[in-house]
Image (cartoon, rainbow, N blue to C red):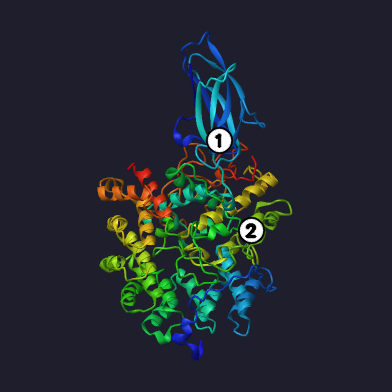
Amino acid sequence: MNVEIQINNSLKPAARYVTWAWSPCLARISNPALIIGTQVAITLNQAALGGGGQIRFSKTASGAGAATLSLTLPKNGASVPFFVRGTVASTADPGLQINAHPASSRLVLGSAALMVRIRKSVTSLTTPERDRLIAALATLNNQGLGRYADFAGTHVQAATPEAHGRPGFLPWHRAFVLDLERELQAIDSSVAIPYWRFDQPAAALFTPDFLGRGVFQGPGTNAVVFSATNPLRFWKAGPTPGIFRDPFFNVNAASPGPMGQAAALALGNPGALFKNFRRLESIAPQDYHGQAHVSFSGPIDSIPTAAQDPLFFLLHCNVDHAWALWQKQNARLDPATAASFETVTPPNRIGHNLGDTMWPWNGDLNPPRPNFALGGTMAPSACVGAPGLKPKVQDVFDYQGSVSLVNNLGFSYDDVPL
Amino acid sequence: MKKTKTKAAASAGRRSVKAAPAKATLPNLKLASGNDGLRQAIDILRDSSETLERRLEALRILQAATFADEQFDAVRSDFVAALRALTEDKEVQLRQRALGLLARSQDSYAEKVLMTGLKQPEKAVVPAVDALHYLSYNLHSGVQSMARSLFETSKDQGVRQQALRLMANDPQAIKTIQKTLANKKETVEIRQTSAEALHALDPTAYQKWASKAVLDASEDADVVATSLTALQHFGDAKAIAGNSALRARLGEMSAGKAAPKLKRMAKMIASKYGL
């Protein structure tokens, strides 16, 4: 007798990744030999594979779950659904495996390896996690010839109104980071984009073995220093090879520019309103997002060139992280809740209303959209179906499927629970 | 910048590596809210009687505000005018910052100032190494031919490195880049930049060169490490597997006849390509 286990309702290797959200899974008898009767009772549990992580099981996509789960599988091979969610992040792939046992013995009837893949702070990455991220970024860039060029070429001056200064700022950048993350995962499925808490020290990030070391208060014109073994030394996303980024702050400390995370989360008050919270994008004299960009001299300090630097995505992952925290704290995950977004009459500019599709994934070249759209549709995921190939603004709010499981975008943050 | 606009003054902006203070505090400019505050910031930025610290803080606040897109439009033209004025400022840090920001938006005024400085060094407002980089944001600015020329004539290794980066876009420069990469009399930094430039310009040519460098027992350890990095992450699996000399060398390295760093990389390449 054998049991087949599907993670995210799939046998594909790329589907064996879970987050804090409930992932739909299936178990079935794939070889009924020696089964007496029409069904068999099994128990699912987890076993370590060296990469860490913990999961919980449930028959429904709700509750805290349990360390084991009993199921009754029909002999005829019909699938029985169950759910799995991560509770501790893995550090390597695979992290652990689900084993299926007979209810009364430890004999393994079937198993499925998986990883609890979570977005973490850059300061908590292990060295192998860091190196896998760097390698995937370098491959995606492929010395300027790879898919990364589409990302650098999208976040430019002509596209500024699609993504900045309006309510769609946070949703658009969530989709942008997710699109890149999925491209990285197509290269190395174990990679999740880490977030850079720019209001806290993150010295390890600005070293030759990670994103490179710049010169304190330099003019941003000499390439950051990489170790000889760092493939990012071949980076090319702007006009010349190299990454140009000189900090205005001591990288052993936090940048003094951005407001602290607590202050950013409080921007929504009173009323925990999105229209207030979104001021974290840019509000003089001190904000959260803009001040992080201008903590350096170099391409990252200007909209037209910012995405030439891969730090852009770690910075924006943290902006998204702040939105995720704010959403959780204030129950603002459902776009149908008025305070979750800024819906106005007359409507916002196209691209900034809940029902609008977002450029460039929609391929819309009609004015006032830009006359170019690089990179095609949103990269698909083997784990989840959302947000679809041409996401709308409203499709990226419920990122863990808390309101509805079908909304799950397939990422979680280490310190933002389901 | 008045009478101080000399080559020496421009050079004053070269990287004198400063020790970063453990904890920075930013000056409080006590700005009004909204666009009034941004206009106050522009006034501070333009005012040469203000301290450099306050002017830099004003610039930082204004830069951050540009991310608000159309909300910044009310003061955008004043901001650009202030940046252009700063290209003549007495403070090299402000000249550099202003020219960097303008160049990244391909501002034609800034490009003219920068190109003039490269052609007539006595009129330079920033060091040539910076001017070359700023001009790189618009490859149609004529900077590429200037880069080829400066690479051959400049004694400043920083300028030559910057020129090499620009030459990575220039097919006419490929022979010069290859020659520089192979020249062991050049500094390791120049050769590493040549490697990056050749990799960007002609990845196949660089892969061939990198394979040879790994076989060269007299080659610099960092140059070998860079070559191994390129082979590991961007290598042509078929070419690597078909190169018996390279396979043998990687085997030697893996077996312990190399520095630990190179040994580790050789093992990773062998593992990746199934050697």
Left or right side of B160 for A63: right
Q: Name the spot of residue B34 as percent of width and height, x first.
A: 65, 68
Could you say which is closer to the camera, residue A63 or residue B128? B128
The residue located at (45%, 60%) in the rendering is A227
Chain hosting mark 2: A
Instruction: Specify whether residue B243 is in view.
Output: no
Dot 2: few (<14), some (14–19), or many (≥20) neighbours within 10 Å?
Answer: some
The percent position of residue A81, horizontal first and vertical second, equals 55, 24
Task: Name which residue type carries label 2.
Answer: Gln
Circles 2 and 1: CB atoms closer than 8 Å: no
User: Quarter of the image containing the C terminus of chain B?
Assistant: top left
> Which of the two residues, A52 or A369, is positioned nearer the viewer here?
A52
Tell me residue A284's x, y (percent). Answer: 64, 66
Question: Badge 2 is on which residue?
Answer: A200
The residue under label 1 is A406
Task: Give the mark nearer the N terminus: 2 vs 1.
Answer: 2
* Type of amino acid under label 1: Val
